[in-house]
Image (spheres, rainbow, N blue to C red):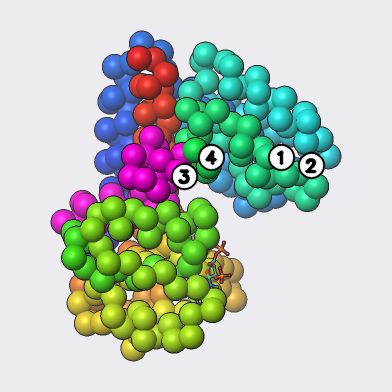
């Protein structure tokens, strides 16, 4: 029976460390959050970021723009925030409504304020192993592994999913930690065979029930990044938790696993940005 990795407890610990470090700065860290349109899920995320900022003693400023916002106006706002001395981090809540060019907006953010670690400069720094910021979700997973003394060095690590936000940076962080990494995606012919090799299995696909117990090696560490809704509308992951926990050595629950850590890592990145900015 697996040990359950408690993301909620670890996130509280990380946020408390961030709060203490932030308190020693001359100026409170400032995070600007831009939300365009009225996507309900985005609204929930933005509200939790505001709450996290308050817990960590940060100043948060929210810019809620209508879905009809023009690209040039959004870029102008980013430009203004890039130059504001009281703003250390800028976050644009994705996805943006149709008609807005996400890539151009992310490129416009000053890399020193790119606390989501989405700017190509920061992605490049991450690739060469000199990251300024940790990508929030994969960074949160690495913190969980560290907390539970799980060392990826020399281990077979299998990442399901190759998105720019989760899969690819997750694979890079595991590689930098000296894991032997396989990345699987929708064209992988035999997912079960790849998974069965994994000492550490990270699933970031978005398909409820994808990972079954017979795909998991006895004693594997299983990290479920996904946040799906099942037929009853309940939040759940990719992994069939009840059956896989009987076989794994460690497992993350959904909710209460990777999700809270993603939020905590955003706070840590904002602190890092503020520390660098105030040097
Ligand atoms: P995404 O951009 O949709 O990427 C999904 C990936 O899964 C793609 O690379 C896709 O392959 C792959 N895939 C799809 N079907 C597959 C299959 N049957 N077998 C193997 N791979 C398959 O999603 P994402 O943004 O990375 O998010 C993934 C999940 O993580 C979602 O549930 C999302 O809600 C969750 N998430 C959670 C957090 C958190 O804080 N916990 C943060 C971000 C995302 P192709 O590239 O070939 O299409």
197 relative to 95, above or below: below
Q: Which image quarter is the N terminus in?
A: bottom left
**CA gap, disc 2 and disc 4:** 23 Å
* Ligand 1 lies under 8 Å from the Cβ of mark 4: no
Which range of residues does the magenta coloring cover? 122-150
Q: Earlier in the sequence, mark 2 or mark 1?
A: 1
Q: Are marks 2 and 1 in contact (CB under 8 Å)?
A: yes
**CA gap, disc 2 and disc 3:** 28 Å
In percent of width and height, residue 190 lies at: 44, 86
Labelled disc at residue 67: 2
The residue nearer to you, when weighing 199 against 267, is 199
The kind of secondary structure element at disc 2 is loop
**CA gap, disc 2 and disc 1:** 6 Å
In percent of width and height, residue 268 lies at: 37, 35
140 relative to 242, above or below: above
* Residue tagged 4: 119
Q: Is residue 220 left or right of residue 203?
A: left
Q: Earlier in the sequence, mark 1 or mark 3?
A: 1
In percent of width and height, residue 10 lies at: 28, 48
- Secondary structure that dominates the magenta span: helix
């Amino acid at each position: 029976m697996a040990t359950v990795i408690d993301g909620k407890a670890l996130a509280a610990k990380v946020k408390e460390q961030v709060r203490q470090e932030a308190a020693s700065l001359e100026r409170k860290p400032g995070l600007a959050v831009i939300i365009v349109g009225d996507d309900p899920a985005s609204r929930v995320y933005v509200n939790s970021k505001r709450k996290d900022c308050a817990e960590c003693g940060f100043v948060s400023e929210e810019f809620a723009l209508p879905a009809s916002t023009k690209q040039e106006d959004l870029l102008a706002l980013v430009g203004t925030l890039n130059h504001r001395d009281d703003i250390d981090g800028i976050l644009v809540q994705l996805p943006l409504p149709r008609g807005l060019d996400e890539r151009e907006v992310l490129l416009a953010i000053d890399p020193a304020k790119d606390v989501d670690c989405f700017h190509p400069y920061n992605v490049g720094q991450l690739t060469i192993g000199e990251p300024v910021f940790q990508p929030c979700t994969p960074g949160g997973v690495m913190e969980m592994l560290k907390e539970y003394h799980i060392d990826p060095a020399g281990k077979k690590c299998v990442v399901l999913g190759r998105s720019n936000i989760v899969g690819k940076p997750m694979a890079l962080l595991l590689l930098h930690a000296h894991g032997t990494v396989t990345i699987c995606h929708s064209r992988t012919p035999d997912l079960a065979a790849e998974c069965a090799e994994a000492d550490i299995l990270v699933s970031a696909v978005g398909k409820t029930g994808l990972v079954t117990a017979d795909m998991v090696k006895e004693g594997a560490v299983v990290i479920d990044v996904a946040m799906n809704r099942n037929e009853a509308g309940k939040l759940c992951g990719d992994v069939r938790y009840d059956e896989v926990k009987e076989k794994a050595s460690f497992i993350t629950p959904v909710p209460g696993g990777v999700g809270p850590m993603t939020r905590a890592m955003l706070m840590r990145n904002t602190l890092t940005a503020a520390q660098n900015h105030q040097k």
